[in-house]
Amino acid sequence: MLKLEGSRCVRYYSKLSGCDRCQAICPEDAIKTQEGGVAIWQQECIECGACVGVCPTEALALSSLNVTEFVFELLKSEDDIIGCRYNFVCLAGLSVEYLIALGLVKDITLDIGHCAECEIKESCFPVIEHNIAQANYVLGAIGAKTIEAKELRKMKENAPDRREFFNLFTLQGAMRAKEELHEEMKALEDPSIALSDSEAKAIRDKTIPNKRKLLFMLLKRFPKPQEYKYLENEHLTFVSDKEIDHTCDNCSICYRICPTEALSTTKRGDKILFDAMLCVRCHLCHDVCEKQSIKLSQYFDTKELFEPEQKVLAAFSMVRCEDCGALYTYFGEEEMLCPRCRIEEEEAKSLWGIE
């Protein structure tokens, strides 16, 4: 069963979110992004895992496969091959972070021998190719071995056809608790996923995806390069560096809504801070910025992978409102009133006919 944790999905953070990666890659049209939510048609889902791989915040997961656990087990084993008919679902289910993490530790070969004849290749294979290229772009820049993709056509003995293979991951958990069976039946009846009260509250909790935590851990163990290089931001999809231009009015929406706290502020609210290695490139800050003040930098410094630091994107003058005493961003106005008091004053003047 494909599960969605609404408190992690950026679609539930804001109706302005334009993220539709899961819908775009789904080969069976089982996922539809909606304003402020997502709908999943479980009866159409073949559990290929591609949507899990492209989700920037790990909001999607297969009940029958934990990708983080799979990666840990692979790192501990002598096996160095990952294949869709051998030990995994669709290779698109492995995000760039996981590919980089694997490449840091061992020689990995991705078996793409079955991709050419696969019924879902049209939507998934371009992503597989792009993820491999992107992972190798980063691994090459930091002096690590790159990941190989070969047509090995490795298979489990008596391997089933493609659709049956995906379903094997579901059949492994056939003896499920009644609660989980009830959950599946309910999902079949209603594809729209609503937030519970606890999930709505959980949105305020900033969470770093497991794939990023694993990458952090393995980068700490990897030797630092003798020199750091710059990567072009346009070739990256899992991380970014950002800039803020002069049009920013410190409305605070970007750092309030950031799901990982890559964007944050100070106690006084006089700075907008950014940690590049906490950014999962969900694009939410760009989607909600009314003035489009936040931009992608042209380059990403690989130093951030090994020596991450918080930088100041923008700084502001903060003063206390002469009326209510609250701190607000001051842009040199003659009257030192916060926006709320300024609006109230204008409304009062309009009410009493004062110009």
Image: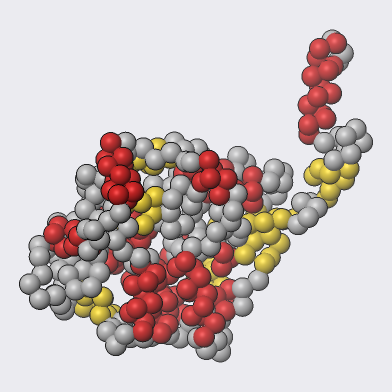
Looking at the image, can residue 170 be seen? no
Instruction: Judge from the rendering whether residue 192 lies leftward or rightward of residue 284; answer left or right.
Output: left
x 83%, y 17%: residue: 348
Looking at the image, can residue 165 be seen? yes
Residue 340, horizontal then vertical, whole percent: 78, 31
Front position in the image: 23 or 193: 193
Front position in the image: 133 or 123: 123
Q: Quadrant of the C terminus?
A: top right
Front position in the image: 319 or 90: 90
Instruction: Judge from the rendering whether residue 61 lies leftward or rightward of residue 56; answer left or right.
Output: left
Residue 13, horizontal then vertical, whole percent: 53, 44
x 62%, y 41%: residue: 291
x 50%, y 60%: residue: 280
Q: How is the image coloured?
A: secondary structure
Asked if 59 appears above or below 145 in the picture, the reply is above
Image-quadrant location for residue 34: top left
Asked if 25 appears above or below 103 in the picture, the reply is above
Residue lying farthest to the top in this orientation: 353
Asked if 196 appears above or below 343 in the picture, the reply is below
Residue 4, horizontal then vertical, whole percent: 39, 50
Instruction: Judge from the rendering whether residue 127 lies leftward or rightward of residue 270; answer left or right.
Output: left
Instruction: Judge from the rendering whether residue 323 lies leftward or rightward of residue 112; answer left or right.
Output: right
x 78%, y 34%: residue: 339
Residue 321, horizontal then vertical, whole percent: 88, 38
Residue lying farthest to the front in this orientation: 178
Residue lying farthest to the right in this orientation: 322
Report how many numbered discs are placed on residues in the image.
0
Asked if 216 appears above or below 200 in the picture, the reply is below
